[in-house]
Amino acid sequence: MDKDNTVVRYSDKELAKFKKIIEEKISKAQNDLGLIRSAYMNDGDNGTEDTSPTFKAFEEGSQTMSKEANTQLAIRQEKFIRDLKNALIRIENKTYGICRVTGKLITKKRLELVPHATLSIEAKNKMS
């Protein structure tokens, strides 16, 4: 709140700009998630059945590691998409860009870089 007790927030025009940024990020993130999932679902048969058994065993170990890494990537990507969708809800509620700790506006520059941020740099630094 500022001096006359009105809540400080971004204007509808500014919120519309952030909404566009977030929707573009969601679209790209969903596309990336699709690629991660298709890599995970692919059994990775690269035609190595006629090569040495040692290489085959090495490749299977690598495949297991790769599937685990892809699973972790997919989980992180799903969380990122969820965080972005939550940011859209905050835009609709007109609470977007307000630090959940200090109640102050998060800088536009920070929101452009991390559009799902809920903490100002000031609050984030205090938590570290």
Image (spheres, rainbow, N blue to C red):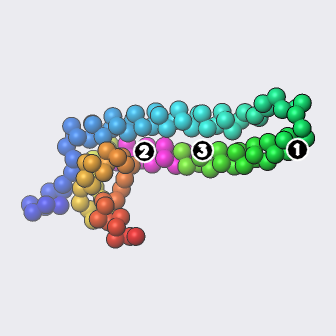
Q: Earlier in the sequence, mark 2 or mark 3?
A: 3
Which residue is identified by label 3? 74
Query: Which numbered disc, 2 or 1, marks the residue closer to the eye?
Result: 1
Q: Which residues are magenta?
A: 78-90
Q: Quadrant of the N terminus?
A: bottom left
Q: Secondary structure at mark 1?
A: helix
Alpha-carbon neighbours of circle 2 within 10 Å: few (<14), some, or many (≥20)? many
State the separation of the CA atoms marked 1 and 3: 30 Å
Q: Position of residue 9 (x, y in %)?
A: 21, 51
Q: Quadrant of the C terminus?
A: bottom left
Residue type indicated by callout 3: Ala
At x 34% / y 67%, what residue is drawn? 125
- Residue 50 lies, with reference to residue 126, above or below; the image says above
Q: Secondary structure at mark 2?
A: helix
Query: Which numbered disc, 2 or 3, marks the residue closer to the eye?
Result: 3
Q: Position of residue 104 (x, y in %)?
A: 23, 60
Which residue is identified by label 1? 54
- Residue 2 lies, with reference to residue 12, above or below; the image says below
Q: Nearer the viewer, residue 9 or 39?
A: 39
The reply to whether the magenta stretch includes residue 52 is: no
